[in-house]
Protein backbone atom coordinates (compact mmCIF):
# COMPACT_ATOMS: atom_id res chain seq x y z
CA UNK A 1 0.00 0.00 0.00
CA UNK A 2 2.82 2.38 0.92
CA UNK A 3 4.65 1.67 -2.33
CA UNK A 4 1.46 2.23 -4.29
CA UNK A 5 0.92 5.58 -2.58
CA UNK A 6 4.56 6.50 -3.28
CA UNK A 7 4.18 5.70 -6.94
CA UNK A 8 0.82 7.43 -7.00
CA UNK A 9 2.32 10.56 -5.45
CA UNK A 10 5.26 10.44 -7.83
CA UNK A 11 2.90 10.42 -10.78
CA UNK A 12 1.08 13.40 -9.34
CA UNK A 13 4.20 15.59 -9.31
CA UNK A 14 4.16 18.18 -12.09
CA UNK A 15 6.92 17.79 -14.69
CA UNK A 16 8.98 20.86 -15.65
CA UNK A 17 6.47 23.08 -13.86
CA UNK A 18 3.54 21.67 -15.81
CA UNK A 19 0.47 20.37 -14.07
CA UNK A 20 -0.84 17.44 -16.12
CA UNK A 21 -4.25 17.79 -14.50
CA UNK A 22 -4.60 21.42 -15.53
CA UNK A 23 -5.23 20.72 -19.17
CA UNK A 24 -7.03 18.04 -21.12
CA UNK A 25 -5.84 19.22 -24.54
CA UNK A 26 -3.18 17.05 -26.13
CA UNK A 27 0.18 18.65 -26.71
CA UNK A 28 0.82 19.49 -30.37
CA UNK A 29 4.19 20.08 -31.99
CA UNK A 30 4.58 23.15 -34.17
CA UNK A 31 5.42 22.49 -37.80
CA UNK A 32 3.43 19.25 -38.17
CA UNK A 33 1.49 18.95 -41.40
CA UNK A 34 -1.98 17.36 -41.59
CA UNK A 35 -0.47 13.88 -41.86
CA UNK A 36 1.60 14.54 -38.75
CA UNK A 37 -1.43 15.79 -36.79
CA UNK A 38 -3.41 12.67 -37.71
CA UNK A 39 -0.50 10.47 -36.66
CA UNK A 40 -0.26 12.35 -33.37
CA UNK A 41 -3.99 11.82 -32.72
CA UNK A 42 -3.73 8.09 -33.34
CA UNK A 43 -0.64 7.93 -31.17
CA UNK A 44 -2.45 9.62 -28.28
CA UNK A 45 -5.24 7.04 -28.45
CA UNK A 46 -2.64 4.29 -28.46
CA UNK A 47 -0.99 5.82 -25.37
CA UNK A 48 -4.30 5.91 -23.52
CA UNK A 49 -4.84 2.22 -24.28
CA UNK A 50 -1.28 1.49 -23.20
CA UNK A 51 -1.89 3.36 -19.94
CA UNK A 52 -4.88 1.16 -19.09
CA UNK A 53 -2.88 -1.97 -19.93
CA UNK A 54 -0.04 -0.76 -17.68
CA UNK A 55 -2.47 -0.17 -14.83
CA UNK A 56 -3.96 -3.65 -15.13
CA UNK A 57 -0.56 -5.31 -15.20
CA UNK A 58 0.88 -3.39 -12.25
CA UNK A 59 -2.27 -3.23 -10.12
CA UNK A 60 -1.96 0.52 -10.07
CA UNK A 61 -5.38 2.16 -9.84
CA UNK A 62 -5.63 4.64 -12.73
CA UNK A 63 -6.65 7.76 -10.87
CA UNK A 64 -7.07 10.95 -12.79
CA UNK A 65 -3.57 12.01 -11.71
CA UNK A 66 -1.42 9.00 -12.39
CA UNK A 67 -3.32 8.04 -15.56
CA UNK A 68 -3.01 11.51 -16.98
CA UNK A 69 0.66 11.76 -16.03
CA UNK A 70 1.49 8.38 -17.51
CA UNK A 71 -0.44 9.25 -20.65
CA UNK A 72 1.46 12.51 -20.82
CA UNK A 73 4.84 10.80 -20.50
CA UNK A 74 4.05 8.20 -23.12
CA UNK A 75 2.42 10.74 -25.41
CA UNK A 76 5.35 13.13 -25.31
CA UNK A 77 7.86 10.34 -25.90
CA UNK A 78 5.89 8.93 -28.79
CA UNK A 79 5.18 12.30 -30.36
CA UNK A 80 8.87 13.16 -30.34
CA UNK A 81 9.51 10.13 -32.52
CA UNK A 82 6.47 10.91 -34.67
CA UNK A 83 7.57 14.53 -35.08
CA UNK A 84 11.03 13.49 -36.17
CA UNK A 85 9.66 10.94 -38.63
CA UNK A 86 7.05 13.24 -40.15
CA UNK A 87 9.15 16.39 -40.35
CA UNK A 88 12.41 14.73 -41.33
CA UNK A 89 13.71 16.68 -44.29
CA UNK A 90 14.06 14.70 -47.44
CA UNK A 91 17.38 14.70 -49.19
CA UNK A 92 17.35 17.22 -52.01
CA UNK A 93 16.84 15.72 -55.43
CA UNK A 94 20.06 15.31 -57.35
CA UNK A 95 20.79 18.07 -59.84
CA UNK A 96 22.80 15.68 -61.95
CA UNK A 97 21.47 15.01 -65.40
CA UNK A 98 19.66 11.64 -65.76
CA UNK A 99 21.78 8.95 -67.40
CA UNK A 100 20.14 7.76 -70.61
CA UNK A 101 20.93 4.54 -72.44
CA UNK A 102 22.74 6.56 -75.10
CA UNK A 103 24.77 8.40 -72.45
CA UNK A 104 25.73 5.12 -70.78
CA UNK A 105 26.94 3.72 -74.10
CA UNK A 106 28.84 6.94 -74.76
CA UNK A 107 30.49 6.79 -71.33
CA UNK A 108 31.63 3.22 -71.97
CA UNK A 109 33.14 4.22 -75.30
CA UNK A 110 34.89 7.21 -73.79
CA UNK A 111 36.41 5.03 -71.07
CA UNK A 112 37.90 2.71 -73.70
CA UNK A 113 39.29 5.61 -75.74
CA UNK A 114 40.70 7.24 -72.60
CA UNK A 115 42.58 4.05 -71.74
CA UNK A 116 43.89 3.76 -75.31
CA UNK A 117 45.04 7.39 -75.33
CA UNK A 118 46.90 6.98 -72.05
CA UNK A 119 48.63 3.81 -73.23
CA UNK A 120 49.64 5.42 -76.53
CA UNK A 121 50.91 8.65 -75.00
CA UNK A 122 52.97 6.80 -72.41
CA UNK A 123 54.52 4.84 -75.27
CA UNK A 124 55.30 8.00 -77.26
CA UNK A 125 56.06 10.57 -74.55
CA UNK A 126 56.93 8.74 -71.36
CA UNK A 127 55.49 10.96 -68.62
CA UNK A 128 55.75 14.22 -70.57
CA UNK A 129 52.09 14.67 -71.50
CA UNK A 130 48.78 15.65 -69.93
CA UNK A 131 45.55 13.72 -70.52
CA UNK A 132 42.64 15.19 -68.63
CA UNK A 133 40.74 12.51 -66.68
CA UNK A 134 37.27 13.36 -67.94
CA UNK A 135 35.36 15.95 -69.90
CA UNK A 136 36.50 19.57 -70.25
CA UNK A 137 34.10 22.50 -70.78
CA UNK A 138 35.38 25.31 -72.96
CA UNK A 139 33.83 28.70 -72.19
CA UNK A 140 33.78 29.62 -75.85
CA UNK A 141 30.69 31.86 -76.00
CA UNK A 142 30.04 33.60 -72.64
CA UNK A 143 26.79 35.50 -72.42
CA UNK A 144 25.01 33.38 -75.04
CA UNK A 145 22.34 30.69 -74.68
CA UNK A 146 25.03 28.02 -75.06
CA UNK A 147 28.20 29.47 -73.54
CA UNK A 148 30.08 26.18 -73.17
CA UNK A 149 31.24 23.32 -75.38
CA UNK A 150 32.18 19.89 -74.06
CA UNK A 151 35.41 18.16 -75.03
CA UNK A 152 35.38 14.38 -74.54
CA UNK A 153 39.18 14.06 -74.27
CA UNK A 154 41.87 16.70 -74.14
CA UNK A 155 45.45 15.51 -74.68
CA UNK A 156 48.43 17.87 -74.42
CA UNK A 157 51.74 16.55 -75.74
CA UNK A 158 55.08 18.06 -76.81
CA UNK A 159 54.02 17.55 -80.45
CA UNK A 160 50.51 19.04 -80.23
CA UNK A 161 47.23 19.58 -78.43
CA UNK A 162 44.47 17.16 -79.43
CA UNK A 163 40.72 17.63 -79.05
CA UNK A 164 39.13 14.18 -79.29
CA UNK A 165 35.46 13.48 -79.97
CA UNK A 166 34.44 9.87 -79.25
CA UNK A 167 31.53 7.94 -80.79
CA UNK A 168 30.60 4.45 -79.61
CA UNK A 169 28.84 3.51 -82.85
CA UNK A 170 28.68 -0.02 -84.24
CA UNK A 171 28.27 -0.82 -87.92
CA UNK A 172 29.83 0.71 -91.02
CA UNK A 173 30.64 4.42 -91.17
CA UNK A 174 30.51 6.00 -94.63
CA UNK A 175 30.91 9.57 -95.92
CA UNK A 176 27.76 11.67 -95.79
CA UNK A 177 26.35 14.01 -98.43
CA UNK A 178 28.71 16.75 -97.20
CA UNK A 179 31.76 17.21 -94.97
CA UNK A 180 29.56 17.78 -91.91
CA UNK A 181 27.82 14.41 -91.96
CA UNK A 182 28.55 10.68 -91.98
CA UNK A 183 26.28 7.72 -92.68
CA UNK A 184 26.05 4.83 -90.23
CA UNK A 185 24.87 1.51 -91.67
CA UNK A 186 23.60 -0.90 -89.02
CA UNK A 187 23.72 -4.68 -89.02
CA UNK A 188 20.16 -4.70 -90.45
CA UNK A 189 21.26 -2.55 -93.39
CA UNK A 190 19.37 0.51 -92.17
CA UNK A 191 21.16 3.80 -92.89
CA UNK A 192 21.27 6.81 -90.56
CA UNK A 193 22.74 10.18 -91.38
CA UNK A 194 24.56 11.63 -88.40
CA UNK A 195 26.64 14.69 -87.67
CA UNK A 196 30.34 14.08 -88.18
CA UNK A 197 32.53 14.12 -85.06
CA UNK A 198 34.83 16.53 -86.92
CA UNK A 199 31.90 18.93 -87.34
CA UNK A 200 31.21 18.71 -83.60
CA UNK A 201 34.86 19.47 -82.89
CA UNK A 202 35.25 22.34 -85.32
CA UNK A 203 34.22 25.21 -83.05
CA UNK A 204 36.20 23.79 -80.11
CA UNK A 205 39.38 23.48 -82.16
CA UNK A 206 38.88 26.94 -83.62
CA UNK A 207 38.35 28.45 -80.19
CA UNK A 208 41.52 26.93 -78.73
CA UNK A 209 43.53 28.04 -81.77
CA UNK A 210 42.26 31.58 -81.22
CA UNK A 211 43.31 31.79 -77.54
CA UNK A 212 46.52 29.73 -77.50
CA UNK A 213 49.89 30.68 -79.03
CA UNK A 214 50.07 29.90 -82.72
CA UNK A 215 53.24 27.83 -82.26
CA UNK A 216 51.20 25.26 -80.35
CA UNK A 217 49.43 23.08 -82.94
CA UNK A 218 45.81 22.25 -82.08
CA UNK A 219 44.10 19.44 -83.97
CA UNK A 220 40.69 17.78 -83.85
CA UNK A 221 40.19 14.03 -84.01
CA UNK A 222 37.14 11.75 -84.17
CA UNK A 223 37.52 8.25 -82.71
CA UNK A 224 35.04 5.38 -83.09
CA UNK A 225 35.31 3.33 -79.91
CA UNK A 226 33.32 0.18 -80.71
CA UNK A 227 35.11 -3.03 -81.67
CA UNK A 228 32.21 -3.66 -84.06
CA UNK A 229 32.78 -0.58 -86.19
CA UNK A 230 34.24 -0.42 -89.69
CA UNK A 231 35.07 2.86 -91.39
CA UNK A 232 35.30 3.75 -95.05
CA UNK A 233 38.70 4.65 -96.50
CA UNK A 234 37.00 7.64 -98.12
CA UNK A 235 36.44 9.32 -94.74
CA UNK A 236 38.77 12.16 -93.67
CA UNK A 237 42.08 10.97 -92.18
CA UNK A 238 41.12 12.49 -88.79
CA UNK A 239 38.25 10.01 -88.40
CA UNK A 240 39.73 6.77 -87.10
CA UNK A 241 38.97 3.64 -85.11
CA UNK A 242 40.18 3.27 -81.54
CA UNK A 243 42.62 0.58 -82.69
CA UNK A 244 44.25 3.12 -85.04
CA UNK A 245 45.16 5.63 -82.31
CA UNK A 246 48.67 4.30 -81.79
CA UNK A 247 49.65 4.70 -85.43
CA UNK A 248 47.81 8.00 -85.96
CA UNK A 249 49.50 9.73 -83.00
CA UNK A 250 52.86 8.17 -83.86
CA UNK A 251 52.61 9.72 -87.34
CA UNK A 252 51.78 13.14 -85.85
CA UNK A 253 54.82 12.98 -83.57
CA UNK A 254 57.08 11.93 -86.47
CA UNK A 255 55.83 14.81 -88.61
CA UNK A 256 56.38 17.32 -85.79
CA UNK A 257 59.91 16.07 -85.17
CA UNK A 258 60.75 16.01 -88.88
CA UNK A 259 59.65 19.64 -89.29
CA UNK A 260 61.89 20.70 -86.41
CA UNK A 261 58.95 22.45 -84.70
CA UNK A 262 59.39 23.70 -81.15
CA UNK A 263 57.93 21.37 -78.53
CA UNK A 264 54.81 22.40 -76.65
CA UNK A 265 55.43 23.12 -72.98
CA UNK A 266 52.86 20.72 -71.54
CA UNK A 267 52.56 22.45 -68.15
CA UNK A 268 52.16 25.94 -69.61
CA UNK A 269 49.70 24.73 -72.21
CA UNK A 270 47.42 23.13 -69.60
CA UNK A 271 47.52 26.31 -67.51
CA UNK A 272 46.51 28.32 -70.57
CA UNK A 273 43.59 25.96 -71.31
CA UNK A 274 42.42 26.13 -67.70
CA UNK A 275 42.04 29.90 -68.05
CA UNK A 276 39.22 29.38 -70.57
CA UNK A 277 37.81 26.07 -69.34
CA UNK A 278 35.82 24.48 -66.52
CA UNK A 279 36.26 20.93 -65.26
CA UNK A 280 33.87 20.95 -62.28
CA UNK A 281 31.26 18.16 -62.29
CA UNK A 282 28.48 20.63 -61.43
CA UNK A 283 29.26 22.79 -64.48
CA UNK A 284 29.41 19.75 -66.77
CA UNK A 285 26.03 18.51 -65.49
CA UNK A 286 24.48 21.95 -66.03
CA UNK A 287 25.85 21.99 -69.58
CA UNK A 288 24.37 18.57 -70.35
CA UNK A 289 20.98 19.44 -68.86
CA UNK A 290 20.92 22.60 -70.98
CA UNK A 291 21.49 20.52 -74.11
CA UNK A 292 18.82 17.95 -73.13
CA UNK A 293 16.19 20.67 -72.80
CA UNK A 294 16.55 21.65 -76.43
CA UNK A 295 17.08 18.15 -77.80
Image: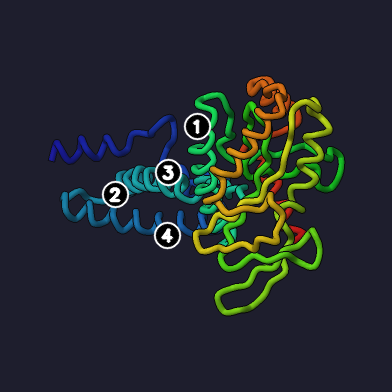
* Residue assigned mark 1: 122
Give the alpha-carbon distance from disc 1 to disc 3, as whole Å.
61 Å
Find residue 180 and report its image quarter. Answer: bottom right
Residue shown at 72%/69% (left/top)? 193
State which quarter of the image contains the C terminus.
Answer: bottom right
* Residue assigned mark 4: 42
Say which of marks 4 and 3 sits in front: 3
Q: Secondary structure at mark 2?
A: loop
Find residue 160 and report its image quarter. Answer: top right
The numbered mark, 3 or 2, whose residue comes first in the sequence reads: 2
- For the question of whether residue 99 can be seen, the reply is no
Callout 3 crowding tier (Cα within 10 Å): few <14, some 14–19, many ≥20: few
Residue found farthest to the right? 143
Q: Is residue 83 above or below residue 123?
A: below
* Residue assigned mark 2: 63
Residue shown at 50%/26% (left/top)? 126
Q: Left or right: where does residue 268 sit relative to residue 49?
A: right
Q: Secondary structure at mark 3?
A: helix
Residue shown at 56%/24% (left/top)? 128
Give the alpha-carbon distance from disc 2 to disc 4, as whole Å.
23 Å
The numbered mark, 1 or 4, whose residue comes first in the sequence reads: 4
Q: Left or right: where does residue 239 sit relative to residue 90?
A: right
In percent of width and height, residue 168 lies at 57, 58
* Residue assigned mark 3: 80
In percent of width and height, residue 14 lies at 38, 34
Say which of marks 1 and 3 sits in front: 1
Q: Secondary structure at mark 1?
A: helix
Give the alpha-carbon distance from disc 1 to disc 4, as whole Å.
69 Å
The residue nearer to you, when weighing 88 against 64, is 88
Q: Are marks 1 and 3 in contact (CB under 8 Å)?
A: no
Amino acid sequence: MTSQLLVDNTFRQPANGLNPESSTKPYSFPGLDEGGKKASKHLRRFCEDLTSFFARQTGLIPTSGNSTMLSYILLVSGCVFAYRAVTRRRKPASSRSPVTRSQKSGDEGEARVQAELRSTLQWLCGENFYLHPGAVLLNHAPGTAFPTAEVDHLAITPFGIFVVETKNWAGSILPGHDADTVVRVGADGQQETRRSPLRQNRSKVGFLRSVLPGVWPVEGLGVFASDHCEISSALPANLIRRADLHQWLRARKARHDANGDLPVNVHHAWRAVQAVADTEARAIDAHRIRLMRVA
